[in-house]
Amino acid sequence: MTVIDDFVTETETRLATVAGVSVIVPTRQGGINIADKTVVIKPQAIQELPEYDRPGNPPAIGQILPLLISCFVIPSELAATPEAWHAAAATLGTACQQAITTGAAWHQVGGDAIDTSIGPLTPAEPDDEEPASIQFTISIKYRVDETNPNTARA
């Protein structure tokens, strides 16, 4: 497993603790079947983080991995007391943020990260492929070996 796999797996495990959610990490072959309370984790492009570089042989290279978390809610319009989309989305998004930030060392993402920050909830408009969602980004800062970008370094 790579350090990216470790980060995604740890995030997936934490999100799965939210009651009633289905967590999906898209694959090339597997499609995304969106239902009520579906949470999708999409790793974004890795960025360089030069201020976290450290000398050594080989040197450690600082990087940041953004993970886009999309929370889909499809509230029933036929319920006895229908819930508005914005209320359901805010509730699910907040529950997912809290699941990720639970524990004193949450920001170390299983011990491999230096620091992690969590972005604000942002509504995403529906398109041809996905219904509306509320999203936030987790930015994981970490170091890897210059000669092996799949291994976390201190």
Image (cartoon, grey):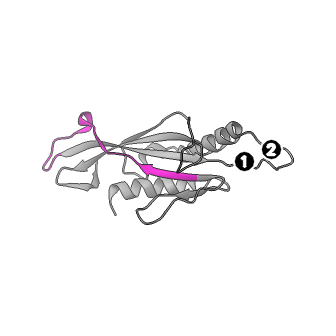
Determine the residue located farthest toward the right in the rendered image. 80
From the viewer's perspective, is residue 113 above or below residue 21? Answer: above
Determine the CA span between mark 2 and mark 1: 7 Å
Report whether 22 appears left or right of 146: right
Identified by mark 2, the residue type is Pro
Relative image position of residue 109 (x, y in whole percent): 43, 49
| Residue designated by label 2 | 82
Q: Between residues 134 and 118, which one lies in front from this camera angle? A: 134
Secondary element at tag 1: loop
| Residue designated by label 1 | 75
Relative image position of residue 17 (x, y in whole percent): 61, 55
From the viewer's perspective, is residue 52 above or below residue 67? Answer: above
Relative image position of residue 25 (x, y in whole percent): 47, 58
> Is residue 16 within the magenta segment?
no
Is the residue marked by circle 1 packed among few (<14), some (14-19), or many (20+) residues within 10 Å? some
Secondary element at tag 2: loop
The answer to which of marks 2 and 1 sits earlier in the sequence is: 1
